Structures are given as structure tokens and as C-alpha cells.
Amino acid sequence: MRMTNSTLVNIKVQIPIRIFIAILCLIMMPHAPAEAVEKHQDSPFYREQLIFDEIPGRPQCHASTITELPGGDLMAAWFAGAHEKAKDVAILSSRLQAGSGKWSTPAILNDAPGLSEGNPVLYTDPRGRVWFFYLVMYGDTWDDCRIHYRFSDSGGLAWSDEKTLISKKGYALRNRPITLNNGTFLLPAANEML
């Protein structure tokens, strides 16, 4: 197992919220439906459900993420392809409408032709903007990744153009941000090159 060093990077992007990237260890309770919270207020809630059985041409899936959208729908995303780091790996997503028991058919959320992608992170901020952070691999290893992002002000129905959060290669992410009281959010990341 490779160890990485802690880094706090102040990121200034052209959005109203400042984003900081930090390596953090976070323990988070899973978000549960309202009825589950009422029944299990003093204990975690667990429910298992498959989103799909198989995706033709994409036999391996990994690194799932989920967020609650404004209005109560859930959106999940993951990367899938021939195998991890393969050039056909794209990020797929599915939506579970509030009150529904069935997830939508998985669809491509992002695909960089000829490049592998990985570790999607979905996050809905307190204002209702949905953030989608992910890695694009510009080589053959995780050291060759850059963090990209898009956002949606329509509950994940339409997305902004892709932007690069950090142009330097080597940063990886896996966990969703936490929001501080002042509205700034911290995005946990690791520098794979240290």
C-alpha cells in the first residue's frame, strides 16, 4: 500500500463558493429516506438494492457515489469499462425518483474518448447545486490523473461545461465534500505523486 502526504490546497475557481482540497479522514453516516430516519433515529439505516444487473460492453464497475437531489430524487454514479484504467472507462449514472422503487437505466454521465476516467463524486450543496467531481487519466496510472468537475442547477438534468479543478497531475479523490458553516466546502483529495 502506498502512503500519501497530507496537503491543503487553496483553489480559486470562478464560482461563488471557494473550494479547498484537503486530505481528510471523514466518518459519515449514510443519508436515509425520511421514513427510515423516523423509524431508526438512533441507529444507521441499511437497504440494499441493485441499480442494474449487467451493462453490455462494460463488465467492470467501481467507485460508486450517491447524492440526494433537490426534490428528493437520488442520483448514483460510478465508473465502468473493460477494466479499471482501460481507455473505454466512462462514468455512468442512474436516478431513483422520489417514491419510486426502480432506478433508471444507466446512462453515460461523462466520457472522455480515448482516456480512462474514475472516482466520481456527486455532492448537492446547501443551495441545491449538484456538483460532479471526477478524475480523467492522461496516461496509464492514477499518477496521471487530473480532477475535473461539472455542476448542475437543474437537479442533474443538464450540466455545465467540463472544467479542470487542478491542472497538476497526481491528485485523486474518492469522498464527497463537507460544507463548513461559512458555505465553503472541503473536498478530500490525495496527492498520488508524493
Image (tube, helix red, strand yellow):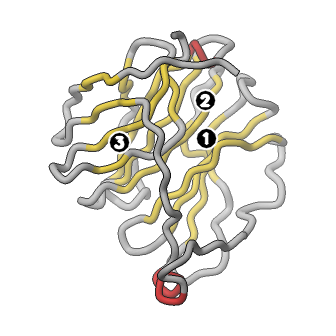
**Left or right of 30 on screen, residue 151:** left
Q: How many marks?
A: 3
Residue 20 in percent (x, y) is at 29, 32
Describe residue 15's horizontal placement relative to residue 125 as left or right.
left
C-alpha span from label 1 to label 3: 16 Å
- Residue type at tag 2: Glu
Instruction: Please say if the residues under marks 2 and 1 sit with CB atoms less than 8 Å apart.
Output: yes
The residue that mark 2 highlights is 117
Question: Which quarter of the figure has residue 71?
Answer: bottom left
Q: Secondary structure at mark 1?
A: strand
The label number, if any, that marks residue 76 in the structure image: none
Which residue is drawn at the image coordinates 38% and 38% (left, top)?
187
Q: Nearer the viewer, mark 1 or mark 3?
A: 1
Could you say whether the residue bearing mark 3 is in a helix, strand or loop?
loop
Measured as percent of width and height from the top left, residue 23 is found at: 43, 30
* Badge number at residue 91: 1
Q: Nearer the viewer, residue 6 or 120?
A: 6
Identify the residue at image location x=26%, y=25%.
11
Q: Is residue 186 positioned above or below 88 on the image?
A: below
Residue type for callout 3: Ser
Neighbourhood count class around disc 2 (C-alpha, 10 Å): few under 14, some 14–19, many 20 upward: many
For label 3, the residue is: 160
Asked if 192 appears above or below 188 in the picture, the reply is: above
| N-term-proximal mark, 1 vs 3 | 1
